[in-house]
Amino acid sequence: MEYLSKQRYDEISAELKHLIGEVYPKVQEDLAEASAQGDRSDNAGYREARRLQGKTISRIRFLQKVLEHARVLDPGVLPKDRVCLLSHVEFTNLQTNARMSFQIVSPHEMDLDAGKISLKSPIGAALMGKKAGEIAEATVPSGILRLRIESIK
């Protein structure tokens, strides 16, 4: 089961609708056109159309699976005193005194540029369940990070 924000659930639904309603019919059209050109064994257009068809079908199936197993979280019922999914966490790296702020999200929503880290990442996993003022230890490739949680929103 995957937990998603309402926004991400809607984005995935829209992408799936676009793929099924617009992209896949176009791919089928291109495939039929390439197939009509004759010998398929020596037809680069046909091979490319088949590759694109497989890629599109694979993406559609993946998104359908995500939505099938997804549960939309209501941020209003989540605890506000400890780090959980959809929490905005500000913390300090105790080795470097660098202050960072991230939102903890599901792997399907992860976007470092937008300040969203996965709850399955080493830092996200270490922060989960902690309260403001507590120290979390995250094992990362460069060693162990000691992080002090400053605030949770």
Image (spheres, rainbow, N blue to C red):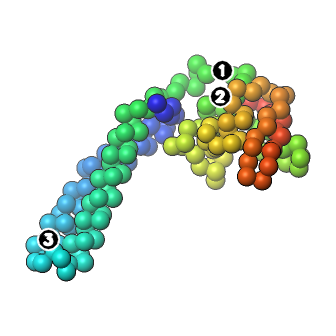
CB within 8 Å, label 1 to label 3: no
Question: Which residue lies most toward the bottom here?
Answer: 42
Label 1 with label 2: CB-CB less than 8 Å: yes
Marking on residue 79: 1
Q: In the visual, does 43 lie left or right of 74? A: left
Q: Measured along the vertical axis of the image, is residue 47 above or below residue 56?
A: below
Image quadrant holding the C terminus, namely: top right
Residue 48 position in % (x across, y down): 28, 71
Pinpoint residue 42: horizontal percent, then vertical percent. Answer: 19, 80
Q: Residues within 10 Å of mark 2 (few under 14, many from 20)?
A: many
For mark 3, what is the residue?
Answer: 35
Q: Which of the 4 image quadrants contains residue 38?
A: bottom left
Q: What separation in Å lies between label 1 and label 3 (alpha carbons)? A: 57 Å
The disc labelled 2 sits on which kind of residue? Cys
In three-dimensional space, the C-alpha distance between marks 1 and 2, rounded to whole angstroms, equals 7 Å
Q: Is residue 67 above or below residue 21?
A: above
What x and y, as percent, mark residue 70? 43, 32
Residue linked to disc 2? 84
Q: Choose between 66 and 111: the one closer to the eye.
A: 66
Residue 69 image-quadrant placement: top left
Q: Which residue lies at the image location 58% right of the left edge and 19% below the top edge? A: 77
Callout 1 amino acid: Pro
**Mark number for residue 151?**
none
The answer to whether residue 25 is above or below residue 110 is below
Q: Residue at x 59, y 49 (%)?
A: 111
Q: Earlier in the sequence, mark 1 or mark 3?
A: 3
Q: Amino acid at mark 3?
A: Ser
